[in-house]
Image (cartoon, grey):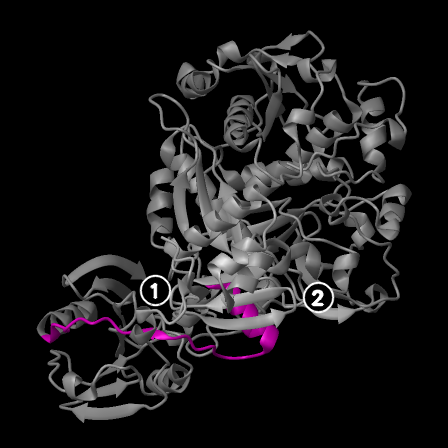
Amino acid sequence: MIDFDKKIGWHPKFTKKVISRNEIILIGENNDHLFTNDKHKRIINLANGSKKVSQFIDEIPSFIEKASFLYSIKTLIDKEILAPLQSEKETLYHLPKKTKDIEIHDDVTIYNLSHISSTLLQNISISKKNISLIFIDNYLDPRLHLINKKHVHSQRPYVLIKLTGSKPMIGPFLSMKKKQPCWKCLSNQLLQNRPILNFLLKKNVENYISHPIYLQNVEIDLKWVTTVINDTIKNENTCFEINLQNNIILKKHIVHNKPQCSICGDRLLLKKQLQSPVNLHSCLKKEKMDGGSRSMSPDETLEKLDKYISPITGVISGLSFISEKKQNTITIYKSVYFKTPSPQEIINNSSFRQISLGKGIVNDQSKVSALCESIERYAALYQGDEFYIKSAPDNLNKRYYLPSQLAKFSKNQYQDYIDNKLPSNILNHLVNIYDTTIPLHWTLTWSLTKEEFVYLPFNHCFSNTPFDHDKQYIHWSSNGCAAGNSIEEAIIQGFYELIERDASAIWWYNKIERPLIDLSTIQEGKVFKIHETLKDEWDYWALDITNDFDIPTIAAIAQHKKTGVFCFGFGCHLNIETACTRALTELCQLIPVREQKNAPFDFNAIEEEQFLKGNGNKKKLSSYQNNESKDIKNDIIWGINKAKTLGFELLVTNYSRPDLPIKTVKVTIPGLCFIWPQLGNERLYNLPIKLGWSKQKLQECELNEMGLYV
């Protein structure tokens, strides 16, 4: 309930930081919040505590606005973001302890950085000797930096223990053995999963921001705590989230070693990797894998990735399904990871949380697809240990590709960027003309075609970089980025994506009428779930949009039976049947999210035109040549050779992070078309004529006006 006669302020568990006139950040023990003046001006003014709620409400003219504002206040009070001033709760929160107590008992060193009484800690009995117990209020306490370095140097193991706050935890036990994590490994991931806090630290160039500590009025059962500590020592690298009122373990969070850790590892690992050739090895496929060319089954991959899902210590914060679970239908999963924007970026509440969707006929494949897409994009985030140099292109000692060779915008699009009159969701994809005398940041990529190194703009290969000056000339996109159990598996997925999007762009922007695919001959087991998912509400069909690469590429189109609105998905694979199922599962993936707010592509704006229905001809699957082999390496070589005959070069940037269980790459083929409108690419206009699909070359103004931002 809201007490109208009281003043309201921020909950006492938060530290308030004002980062600009328009932005306030609240830092808490477990959660951080951003409030901006454009969306939360009244809330910010109320939380200043200068007026009672009733006085503030009286100043709002509209009844609807009053009701909406009261609902917002109640929601924020329920979430313990706002609280009445002079609340009894304030007495439960204390500023962090500044002192550090160190005691030694029988080869067990106790560091007390917490509010727990040091006298109480003397009674802890640990079975393991030559160990340190470090009691903390905050896992990010900067005093842990020197303590950790000391223990890494002496190879003395230790346990972190947090018995204060709203989320007490015991662990991890850090053994200090080789290839095992240290506190720096842990703190890096903790900060990655606190992107608002991380952003604030980077922006203000601080190494720590304290917050009030919640001290529960609970008598600690030291015997039970000691038992959990001893169990933690038997379970290396695990944090146990505990409930001290009921003496139960709630959750486990796995801590992972970072081989590239600046304290316990080799900070240069990724630099060395980016300067090493990409060598292909034999990589046999699993037979009849949902999702295409995979060297491991979905359940095997899921087992590897499951340990990396945790909102506290994981690379991926969570995994959940978004489509309604029905028998014999496809379930779409989403995974979430966090991104910390660069300090110069203009932020809002959508700046920090990133969502990836998965596709697949079986549940495990859909889960793996969502997880791998998150890892593929998480790994591409700038972390500071990448190889790059800053130079004007003509001063580089190897071949290079310019921004204009990687993203071919037209003169009109360059002018649109300069005029700055288009909506921001379109302008954000455009760039300025690059003057080659201006230095850019570059990284190395490996040419599988010519077996030599080539320079690419760093911002083409990595996202969220601090090189804001470069961003006016080149943007990162996920096009060609892929993850796999092996480097070969990742490369083939990235390659297929480039071919798929090249073909999709040429079909879409030219509105080419292409043949239908006879789906009746696909194995029933592969399409049964797809049909069950779509049949009640959607008519659906598939078009062959394969171009000069001769790799089957499919557009799966659906039209709602009642409303007539459209949706579509794309798929590409050397095997025509797999290409079809990939397109159809992507269609199923996009239907649940097709009407999401602020999406850059509006499916409801698609008008019914003949090119969406096809040219009336129907092709049987048996008419397609199957160039797929049993070895992914051979499929890649086939793709390299095909690209070469068409005058294209296949480049691979291996940005696999040493601490992740799967490989990640960005495949680049300069000169291909992209689904986002890059209307200066002559291939977009010439290929339909070359292949006999059109008789007359279109002008830029005649192309499909809807940018394919999917």
Q: Amino acid at mark 2?
A: Phe
- Disc 1 marks a residue whose amino acid type is Val
Give me the C-alpha separation between circle 1 and circle 2.
31 Å
* Residue range (magenta): 194-222
Residue 257 lies, in percent from the top left, at 38, 67
Q: Is residue 202 magenta?
A: yes
Where, by quadrant of the figure, is residue 637 drawn?
A: top right
Seen at 38% across and 64% down, the residue is 30
Q: Secondary structure at mark 2?
A: loop
Dot label at residue 467: 2
- Of residues 242 and 371, the one nearer the viewer is 242
From the image, tell me which residue sits under label 1. Answer: 255
* Front position in the image: 568 or 653: 568
Whichever of labels 1 and 2 marks the residue nearer the N terminus, that label is 1
**Relative to 651, is 363 on the left or the right?**
left
Can I make out residue 308 in this image? no
Helix, strand or loop at mark 1:
loop
Characterize the local packing of mark 1: few (<14), some (14-19) or many (20 or more) Cα atoms within 10 angstroms. Answer: many
Asked if residue 242 can be seen in this view, the reply is yes
Q: Position of residue 157 (x, y in %)?
A: 26, 80
Which label belongs to residue 691?
none
